[in-house]
Amino acid sequence: MSAHEILQRMEAALAARAEAIKPLAEIQGQRADLLAKLAALDEPYGKAYADAEARGWNAEELAEIGIEEPAKRPKGRPRSRRQVVKKPAAASSPEAPSPAAAVPAQGSTASAAPVGAGTQSS
């Protein structure tokens, strides 16, 4: 088989492969357009759904009449966080060393016993 014949076969194979890509590329372009349009509708759909709920509809009723819950809920006011009441810090006593004091530094040759553990009196 000559080099010319090999190149002809290769070109024929590549042409067949290229033809298979053309419809896929066209459909991919259409698909991307539709996904962009759908994404543009997500926010107004979510707001309209939330408005329907605010006017008395609930998710079950909306589902019964064929209205799907939106994929993304509209952004609203953030939920208020519960206020955490901090207890006043108690004065530290020698009997209760801090947890960090019980862990020796890396490379330290000191024992892992808490600071003051051996100095407690009875």
Image: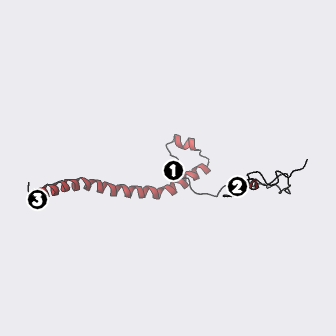
Could you tell me which quadrant the N terminus lies in? bottom left
Location of residue 22 (image quadrant): bottom left
Circle on res. 95: none
The amino acid type found where label 2 is placed reads Arg
For the residue labelled by badge 3, is the local secondary structure a helix, a strand or a loop?
helix
Real-space CA distance between mark 1 and mark 2, rounded to the nearest whole angstrom: 25 Å
The amino acid type found where label 3 is placed reads Ala
Residue at left offset 61%, top offset 57%: 76
Q: Where is residue 31 in the image (x, y as percent from the top left)?
A: 36, 54
For the residue pair 108 and 37, the one nearer the viewer reads as 108
Instruction: Tell whether 2 sits left or right of 109.
Output: left
Residue at image mark 1: 71
Instruction: Tell whether 107 sits left or right of 34.
Output: right
Mark 3 near mark 1, Cβ–Cβ under 8 Å? no
**Label 1 neighbourhood size at 10 Å, few (<14), some (14-19), many (20+)?**
few
Residue at image mark 2: 81
For the residue labelled by badge 1, is the local secondary structure a helix, a strand or a loop?
loop
Instruction: Tell whether 98 sits left or right of 54.
Output: right
